[in-house]
Image: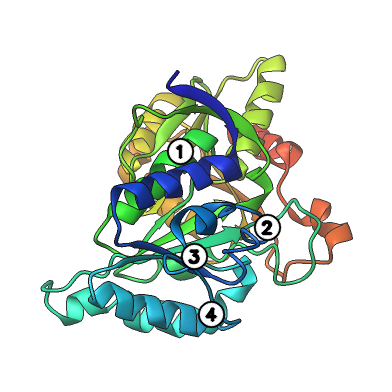
Amino acid sequence: MSIETLPFSKALNAGMRAAMQQDDHVLMMGEDIGRLGGVFRVTEGLQAEFGDRRVLDTPLAESGIVGTAIGLAMAGFRPVCEIQFDGFVFPAFDQITTQLAKLTNRHEGRMSFPVVIRIPYGGHIGAVEHHQESPEAYFTHTAGLRVVSPSTPNDAYWMIQDAIASNDPIVFLEPKSRYWTKGEVDLAARALPLHASRIVRRGTDVTLVGHGAMVTVLLQAAALAESEGVSCEVVDLRSLSPVDYGPIVESVRRTGRMVYGQEAPGFTSLGSEIAATVTEQAFFSLEAPVLRVSGFDVPFPAAKLEGAYLPDADRILEAVDRALAY
């Protein structure tokens, strides 16, 4: 059978295993990813299968992990770096944004740097400070990086393989609250290219757009809206940079309204850019302003307050009501 039901984390694991089996130049690097299998056990079993020369337990030094990966890429390898938590990526921020993102351009395209940086991100797990952040805007703002985020186990399985096969550096954002969610994985055929967005629910009244764990929240809101006679279309962004605007704009031209949902703070965020672009491209189809629902413009709060900080279905529905009121 080519269809299996897997948790999101196991789908990622299977995707990385497939990539390592297909190409001996694929390496895994990160803190505790070998014998332990990573904090979330996403790399569990890979070191036992491929050895400690291909699945490397590194020192606690994110800048060293990414810097070493850059050198390995120059030598012809395809390193996959795991950052344990979203808030821990910033010690490597200089290596990612001023080195990795720039090197292909610096070499006028003569060298490629196929480095994947896996970052578990986002809330909903009741963790402490620096463990539940959504730093995607930093990376989508950086020219030279590609940024993607799967929301389903099937996308996790295929998108991690496509990211590893890419010759460009890719920030691979994994919604950690989805790690234990199960879903069907087609092991035989990928559904979409890496940088394609996808309509996951059809509707006629309002377009809801988001990425990662927020897609689940949007689907919950759409189901509740349907019970009140409102039909919401839901678009999973999947690729944050570049953005595939085609399905989004086509949807907005049909519905005339759009709400963007994200866990990250709203000011100068990915949602801001998408709202502006959709307004430019679908202005004459819009019946209301593009609305955004986001985390608040404050540092991520203590775990007991995350429910008040993170957008939920009720906050999405409030925006839907506002869009329909115009």
Secondary element under disc 3, as helix, strand or loop, is helix
**Mark 4 vs 2, N-terminal side:** 4
Badge 2, how many Cα within 10 Å: few under 14, some, many 20+?
A: many
Q: Nearer the viewer, mark 4 or mark 3?
A: 4
Q: Which mark is residue 155?
A: 1
Badge 3, how many Cα within 10 Å: few under 14, some, many 20+?
A: some
Q: Amino acid at mark 1?
A: Asp
Residue annotated with mark 4:
62
| Residue 296: quarter of image | bottom right
Q: Amino acid at mark 4?
A: Glu
Report the Cα–Cα distance between label 3 and label 1.
Answer: 21 Å
Q: Amino acid at mark 3?
A: Ala
Answer above or below: position of 193 versus 77.
Answer: above
Residue found at x 58% / y 38%: 215
Return the residue nearer the eye: 41 or 296: 41
**Mark 3 vs 1, N-terminal side:** 3
**Mark 4 vs 1, N-terminal side:** 4
Residue 48 place in picture, x, y as percent: 53, 56
Badge 4, how many Cα within 10 Å: few under 14, some, many 20+?
A: many
Secondary element under disc 4, as helix, strand or loop, is helix
**Mark 2 vs 1, N-terminal side:** 1
Residue annotated with mark 2:
295
Q: Which mark is residue 287?
A: none
Report the Cα–Cα distance between label 2 and label 3.
Answer: 13 Å
Q: Nearer the viewer, mark 4 or mark 2?
A: 4
Report the Cα–Cα distance between label 4 and label 3.
Answer: 19 Å
Residue annotated with mark 3:
137
Q: Are marks 2 and 3 in contact (CB under 8 Å)?
A: no
